[in-house]
Every structure is written in structure tokens, then in C-alpha cells.
């Protein structure tokens, strides 16, 4: 189980396939949806039965749950989107950047520096200054 930088907060492991992430993304956007609604929201959607199978797998992993709505199931995510984002980010940091947020930020800046506007640079500078003051 991953531990976030807020000591002791356990996050779900990032054990998701590309399709599972697409399903969760559709669910986070809709907040709750049927398998058919999720399928409609997916890029290059797999078959309906494949979506149902993936939803069952996500339920087994603890990422979604379903509620009975007459003859159909309505699915909802069990992990808050912000919490899932932190978990995914922590996984990327640990996998590709030796757990270093600084290395990740430098890589992003290297890739996107030409696309950043003066306003973006000012905002980043302000955020860094606030973080520096908060940590001091």
C-alpha cells in the first residue's frame, strides 16, 4: 500500500490498466453512471460486456461499487478523485523520479518551458515562493 506525503494516509495502489483508468475517468466526470453510460464516454470503447467485466474487476480491487437501480447497476467510485490523483502522482514520482518532486518538476519544465506564458511563469514563481515561506 502506498503512503502519501501526509504521514499515515494510505492510498490505493496504482494497479490499473489503461482501460480501467478510462473507466474511472468517465466515472469521476459523471460521478455515477451505468455501464452503458461509461461505455459511451470511453474513447474507442470496448464492447459492453468488456466494460461490465472491467467494472467487476474494479469492484474487486475496491475502486468502484455499484448500487441497484431497478434492473440495472449504477457505478460510483469509492476513492475520491483528489486522493486517486495523489496516489497516481506518488506512483509516477517513485517509478520515474526516485521519489523526487524536484526531479519531476524539472522534467516537466524542460518539456513545457517553451509553451509556458509569462503569466504561467509568474504563477509558478508565486507558488514556489509560497511553498518556500510555508516550509521555512
Image (spheres, rainbow, N blue to C red):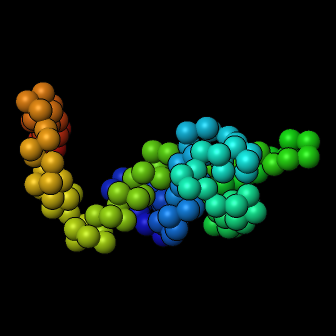
Q: In the displayed structure, would residue 63 be above or below residue 115?
A: below
Question: For this view, does 85 lie left or right of residue 67?
Answer: left
Name the residue: 76% across, 63% down.
Answer: 49
Name the residue: 58% across, 50% down.
Answer: 42
Question: For this view, does 86 lie left or right of residue 45?
Answer: left
Name the residue: 85% across, 47% down.
Answer: 72
The residue at the far top in this view is: 119
Q: Is residue 72 visible?
A: yes
Question: For this view, does 104 lie left or right of residue 38?
Answer: left
Q: Is residue 126 visible?
A: no
Q: Nearer the viewer, residue 44 or 12?
A: 44
The residue at the far right in this view is: 70
x, y percent for residue 102: 15, 57
Residue 48 appears in which quarter of the rendering?
Answer: bottom right
Quarter in which the C terminus is drawn:
top left
Name the residue: 43% across, 66% down.
Answer: 2
x, y percent for residue 33: 70, 42
x, y percent for residue 10: 48, 60
x, y percent for residue 126: 12, 31
Q: In the displayed structure, would residue 92 be above or below residue 41?
A: below
User: How many marks are shown on the rendered structure?
Assistant: 0
Amino acid at each position: 500500500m502506498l503512503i502519501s506525503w501526509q504521514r499515515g494516509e494510505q492510498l490505493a495502489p496504482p494497479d490499473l490498466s489503461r482501460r480501467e483508468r478510462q473507466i474511472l475517468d468517465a466515472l469521476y466526470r459523471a460521478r455515477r453512471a451505468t455501464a452503458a453510460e461509461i461505455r459511451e464516454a470511453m474513447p474507442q470503447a470496448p464492447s459492453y460486456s468488456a466494460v461490465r467485466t472491467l467494472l467487476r474487476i474494479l469492484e474487486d480491487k475496491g475502486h468502484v461499487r455499484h448500487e441497484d437501480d431497478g434492473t440495472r447497476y449504477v457505478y460510483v467510485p469509492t476513492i475520491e478523485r483528489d486522493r486517486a490523483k495523489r496516489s497516481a502522482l506518488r506512483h509516477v514520482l517513485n517509478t520515474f523520479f526516485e521519489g523526487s518532486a524536484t526531479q519531476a518538476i524539472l522534467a516537466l519544465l524542460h518539456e513545457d518551458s517553451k509553451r509556458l506564458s509569462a503569466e504561467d511563469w509568474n504563477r509558478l514563481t508565486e507558488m514556489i515562493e509560497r511553498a518556500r515561506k510555508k516550509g521555512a
